[in-house]
């Protein structure tokens, strides 16, 4: 029988995922728990395992397509499973079904046997044909047994849609151009009125577009991606594109190419514009930053401190850590100093429960560490920092950062943070205005740790200094509080021996 496999909920709050790659092809044998696809959700790429032993029957999504959780991702042919017992039928219905089944027996496709609410009862071959012809299978009326949609039904729907589009385009031309003929002085006078072009109701670069087969063929002939053609109407909630829209878009593309060629001729190189899909990790980051910036009123406090003793202490311990196979950076010292300061300023380790109008003070310390990767910013969370020693912090932090950069980190390892730190100084910056990782109320930004001129006993010396930028949610934290917190944090970093008392 055919087993439908729906995209599972791979993490709390995830409503959809982008199909990154298929790991199988139609006809491939699979075993239970074998990875069949990779799906990108939120900030991680998740491997999707097969739930059964069987053979891949049909892949129902394209790589790069965004699939809602609960939608059928692919189907399997599974042997040894009994089909669900069909509802009772009269003898005449059974006879009719037998006759129709015999007529369609030339197509060796396995029929779907389950029709949950909202699902269309159709053979995989009919679904595949519908996608090829650009037909919305949900709108096709099935004539087979129990309303099953056959290939014949799909072809008939495609022909009806083509005829409908032709009639609509003819009516559109007739309505746009009205010719009035009158007689003036014995001669015919003709007045032509052209209507304004329809306004576009949806932008380009969609994930799905409705269009007649003839329109799709025209787009293929012109080398045009039909999902990039601006639409002028919607049908069943989906953008609909006509042949005229394809022609207009092709003409605009040709004009743009001519402009690019002219630009190259005058010394410019490359296209004048490039469009990149705004989705995946970049879209997730954008939504989170927007939510945070427009929810929490931000205030940023800047300061710096002489950390020469911190540099010397780390240099002394670096070789000891390497002997134990651990790379020791400055970050474990900073994390320890943050936790020590947070204990004296607990509101900075909290959150605002807006629904219940309560400030939630957290008595555990899970510090998020922002990591720049090739795919965007990720924030792995180091749990229970207050309960770990320096080397343990360093080891676990290095592992989390490596997993974030090679995209093997799990959602659980990026959740549950109470405070976040970001190190923009790693690329040479000094001060910034970091955006809070909502619903947290504070984020610490580190500038570049390097030698700068410092006044020591009325003399100017080259000393190692560390600039910081700390943003807070001003609904909960006052400016005086963040200033006091920063002073205590910097004192720990100025004199790291104080951390031995924590």
Image (cartoon, rainbow, N blue to C red):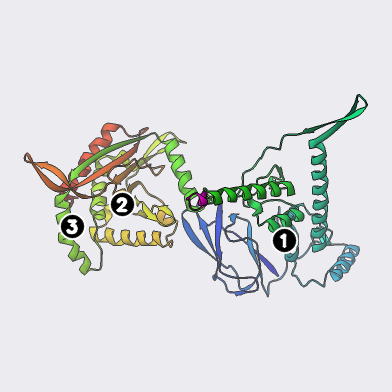
Q: Is residue 196 left or right of residue 190?
A: left
Secondary structure under tag 1 reads helix
x and y percentages locating residue 429 in the rendered image:
29, 47
Which residue position is annotated with label 1?
132
Residue at the (63%, 73%) spot, across then down: 54
Which residue position is annotated with label 2?
427
Which residue occupies the extreme top position in the image? 185
Which residue position is annotated with label 3?
314
x and y percentages locating residue 164 in the rendered image:
82, 48
Spatial CA span between label 3 and label 1:
63 Å
Sequence-first tag of 3 and 1: 1
x and y percentages locating residue 245 in the rendered image:
70, 46
x and y percentages locating residue 436 in the rendered image:
38, 42
Q: Which residues are magenta?
A: 263-270
Q: Is residue 424 above or below residue 315?
A: above
Is residue 405 a member of the stretch shown in magenta?
no
Sequence-first tag of 1 and 2: 1
User: How many residues crowd mark 1 within 10 Å: few (<14), some (14–19), many (20+)?
Assistant: few
Spatial CA span between label 1 and label 2:
49 Å
Secondary structure under tag 3 reads helix
Sequence-first tag of 2 and 3: 3
Secondary structure under tag 2 reads helix
Residue at the (71%, 37%) spot, across then down: 197
The answer to whether marks 2 and 3 mark residues whose Cβ atoms lie closer than 8 Å is no
User: Is any part of residue 97 visible from this angle?
Assistant: yes
- Which disc is residue 167 wearing? none
Residue at the (66%, 57%) spot, across then down: 223
């Amino acid at each position: 029988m055919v087993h439908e496999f729906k995209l599972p909920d791979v993490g709390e709050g995830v409503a959809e995922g982008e199909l990154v790659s298929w790991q199988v092809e139609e006809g491939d044998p699979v075993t239970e728990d074998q990875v069949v696809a990779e799906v990108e959700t939120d900030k991680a790429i998740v491997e999707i395992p097969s739930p059964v032993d069987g053979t891949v029957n049909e892949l129902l999504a394209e790589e790069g397509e965004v699939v809602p959780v609960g939608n059928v991702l692919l189907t399997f042919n599974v042997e040894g499973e009994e089909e669900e017992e069909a509802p009772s039928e009269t003898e005449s219905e059974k006879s009719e079904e037998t006759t129709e089944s015999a007529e369609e027996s030339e197509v060796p496709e396995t029929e779907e046997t389950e029709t949950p609410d909202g699902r269309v009862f159709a053979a995989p071959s009919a679904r595949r044909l519908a996608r090829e012809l650009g037909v919305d299978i949900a709108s096709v009326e099935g004539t087979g047994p129990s309303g099953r949609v056959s290939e014949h039904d799909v072809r008939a729907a495609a022909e009806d849609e083509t005829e409908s589009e032709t009639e609509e385009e003819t009516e559109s031309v007739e309505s746009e151009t009205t010719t009035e003929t009158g007689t003036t002085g014995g001669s015919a006078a003709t007045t032509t009125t052209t209507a304004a072009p329809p306004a576009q109701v949806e932008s380009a670069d969609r994930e799905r577009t409705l269009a007649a087969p003839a329109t799709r063929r025209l787009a293929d002939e012109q080398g045009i991606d039909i999902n990039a053609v601006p639409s002028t109407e919607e049908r069943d909630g989906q953008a609909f594109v006509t042949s005229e829209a394809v022609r207009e878009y092709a003409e605009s593309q040709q004009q743009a190419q001519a402009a690019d060629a002219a630009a190259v001729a005058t010394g410019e190189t490359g296209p004048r514009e490039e469009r990149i899909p705004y989705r995946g990790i970049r879209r997730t980051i954008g939504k989170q930053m927007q939510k945070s910036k427009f929810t929490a009123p931000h205030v940023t406090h800047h300061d710096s401190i002489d950390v020469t003793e911190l540099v010397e202490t780390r240099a002394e311990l670096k070789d000891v850590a390497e002997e134990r196979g651990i790379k020791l950076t400055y970050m474990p010292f900073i994390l320890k100093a943050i936790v020590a300061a947070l204990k004296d300023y607990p509101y900075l380790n909290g959150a605002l429960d807006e629904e219940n109008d309560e400030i939630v003070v957290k008595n555990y310390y899970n510090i998020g560490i922002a990591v720049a990767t090739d795919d965007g910013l990720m924030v792995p969370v180091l749990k229970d920092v207050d309960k770990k020693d320096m080397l343990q912090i360093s080891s676990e932090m290095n592992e989390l950062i490596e997993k974030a950069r090679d995209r093997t980190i799990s959602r659980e390892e990026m959740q549950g943070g109470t405070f976040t730190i970001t190190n923009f100084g790693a690329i040479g910056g000094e001060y910034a205005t970091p955006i809070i990782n909502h619903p947290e109320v504070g984020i610490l930004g580190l500038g570049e740790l390097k030698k700068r001129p410092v006044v020591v006993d009325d003399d100017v010396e080259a000393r190692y200094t560390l600039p910081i930028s700390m943003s807070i949610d001003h609904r909960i934290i006052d400016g005086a509080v963040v200033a006091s917190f920063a002073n205590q944090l910097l004192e720990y970093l100025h004199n790291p021996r104080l951390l031995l008392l924590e």
